Amino acid sequence: MADEYNMKKKRKRGPYREKEIIKKDGLPIPVLTLNGPGPALDLTSNESTTEQLHENYIFESEVNQSFVIEDEIQNNLFFKKGPEASMLQSTIDHGDLDAITFEQATEIDLKSDDPELDDILKSLYEETIELEDPFELWEDSNEDEHTFTNFDQNDDLNSDLDLRPLYPGASVTVGAFMLLLALFTTNFGVSSEGTQVKISMKDCNIVFTRNTPDGTYEDIYDGKIYKSLNRENGLLSNPDNISFTFNTDGAAVFKSSKVLVWPIFLVINELPYKLRMKRENMILASLWFGSQKPAMGTFLKPFQHSMKNLYNGIECFSPKRGAFLSKGILLCGTADLPARSILCNHIQYNGAYSCWKCEQQGTSAAVGKGQTRVFPFDEANPKGPERTVHNVIENAHQTLNGTNGASSVVKGIKGPSWLSFFPEFDIVNGIAIDYMHGVLLGVQKLLLELWFAQKHSSKPFNFFQKLCQVDERLIRIRPTTEITRLPRTIQNDLKYWKASEYRSFLLYYGAPVLHGILDQERWSHYLLLVNAMHVLLKYGSTDEEVNEAELYLLEFCKNFPRLYNGCYMRLNIHQLLHLADCVRNLGPLYTHSCFSFEDKNGALIRMIRGTQNIDSQIVTGVSFLQKLPELKQNCIEKGSVCETLYNSMECPYILKRMKKIGNIGYILGSIKEITLSASENVALHDFFGYELIQMKFQCFKRLELKDCIVYGKSYTRMVKRDNSVIEYNCRGLINYGQVKFFINLVENEQQYYLAFIEKLRCGNYAPKSNILRVSKTTSLEVIPIENITTSCMLVTYDGAQYSYICKFPNKMESD
């Protein structure tokens, strides 16, 4: 190896070409020259050329972020390992480039309420450290030899430039124009290399108040884990402290290679749900880039180090409050099954003891020509024996001591996980079951395959011969605008379905469409899953409802082997038994699902414009996106034409608000004058109790109301969607109907905003039912728009005697 390093060779790498490799103090040091014209960079020198190299390989930011990259040359930092040092893959914490050791980087306070557990955890931590070869990072230059630019000294000058007119007499400033240009390049994928934007940190007030009854689950704060930290003297009882939810998953960068990026995203739980899931409010905490999955010992080490510093507290400053101490804690994490297994150092989903919530071993079952791991329903203890933090740490300790004989795996645990060393992190209950991958891409996808795949046509549970009828029903459904994707056929398009389409089928389309297709027993069995998922995704579900949903899932899993086959009782089916506990511990399932994080992975990939310096491209893009709202506030005047243009580029499909209706909502679109028909005049007469003198009324067809958008049936431009169905209160009763249009009138010096409703008759109304059977009527009713409770979806198809009203479990989650 040493002879190979001493050989002269040429190799292209980014903007540099490796000219030769020499030795200095026993270390192989490359001498690089620029591929184009320019001075040579000699890494053996400690002069300012070192800083030039850092400009090409180091991204420095105000936020302490860590990145793992695979490269032979890495910021002139090397591992010192034994007498013969070599350049290896390393982890760099850009907030701390001083010489550090592995032990220093991972030093934490290990403590719990159980002294016996403390001893095991400390012993496990020491043995985990010993697993790593001791090494030391050092930099081949002194800190004093680096020069750092203080951008803050030119704040006033840069501010004046931002406010300068674009040209003499222009109403647009330079800052506003540059921001609009930057937003355009971001949204439309235009490369903007060479653009540098100066940004500054601002205060962020994350404290907000909530009034939620006990035993109600609206958000992550209502789960047991958050409440345990929010009790008296708990870390989260102080409003200055915050908690995080993390996610990690791999995303392919190029179609022609196996290169992946693995980001670790953090969201601040104390922000309202829709605000915390915005791109600019997510934190890119760490990034792995390479052709293989991350080595979690390397990947999580700097992340754990940063979380330890946050847990101990950092000093913050606010102009209003002055200096104060703020602490942060990792509350929970979510990932798909493959990512979860490497995060927790746990067996893969197809192995024994692969359930992370319990210690059921499972058995092997034959499927086709192979074998699979199944979890038969245990009526005596369907969810147990329970896996606990104590058991995980003890099992990890046993793997290191070899107490399990030749096997290095103890009850699915392959060794210690770095997550065990995060302060106060519950590695069992804090790792959520992601319903997007488990229920939608797992259970619902499996059921559709069993019902309609031709390869199962000989089985009693298969209905392939009715597939055309199902597709005909599906494509005639007109969903609301809350559902971004229109229904697609199963026969031709199922292999292209996204997770959001499986969600729409499970929660809304499936039960109505499959009525009369499946036999009664299997259809009723499927309704158990549908009703349970509605409750577990519901905003404001109660303890009683969660307990009832758990019983539905127990019954579903119990009867699944009998109605289908025991070989399909795989981990995704088994995990349904633990979903209710996830809600009890972490709140509704949507608060910790991967839907929002998957979207951010796609945004990361779109930031990559070339094959060089992938990590720098991503970090620069993320930093820029997170600063767009602040730049908008500083550079664009409210109410200006520039703000209108900015909003139209940021949200091109946003509806134009017209007149505001008190605190209720907004009129959307134009207002026109109409004359009512005879039946409409009768309905208006019934509402007021007398006949109005007024003959013409101000009419509008679209309304933004609370958390929903309602379109009248008279809005004929909407053909493939139906936003007219609502739930409303009338005389103290809950009713359903389709809005025809809205009117605005003044009667007896009082302003009225009224909706004309075509009533839907619900003969078997049940408050707990999420899908109701209704029939259309010709009855017309007038109600004040403030009586509208929420919007719903109507599922109907040709030849059906009834239609179906589908309620939304929450209005927080979006496709």
Image: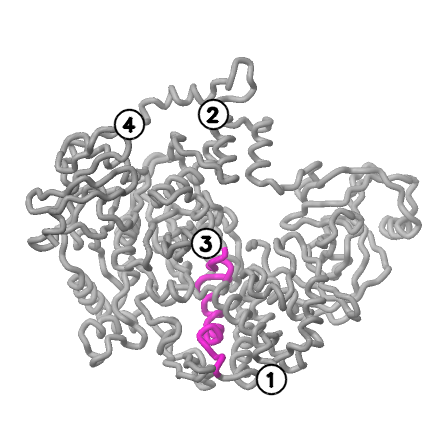
The Cα atoms of the two marked residues, 2 and 1, are separated by: 68 Å
The amino acid type of the residue labelled 4 equals Asn
Q: Look at the numbered disc 3 and give the secondary structure of its residue.
A: helix
Q: Residue under label 1, please give it.
A: 458
Is 704 inside the magenta-drawn segment? no
The Cα atoms of the two marked residues, 4 and 3, are separated by: 35 Å
The Cα atoms of the two marked residues, 1 and 3, are separated by: 40 Å
Q: Residue under label 3, please give it.
A: 597
Q: Residue under label 4, please give it.
A: 150
Query: Residue 18: which quarter of the image?
Result: top left
Q: Of the numbered discs in the image, which one, if any, rests on residue 175?
A: 2
Q: Look at the numbered disc 2 and give the secondary structure of its residue.
A: helix
Q: Look at the numbered disc 4 and give the secondary structure of its residue.
A: loop
C-beta proximity under 8 Å, tags 4 and 1: no
The Cα atoms of the two marked residues, 2 and 3, are separated by: 31 Å
Chain part drawn in magenta: 567-595
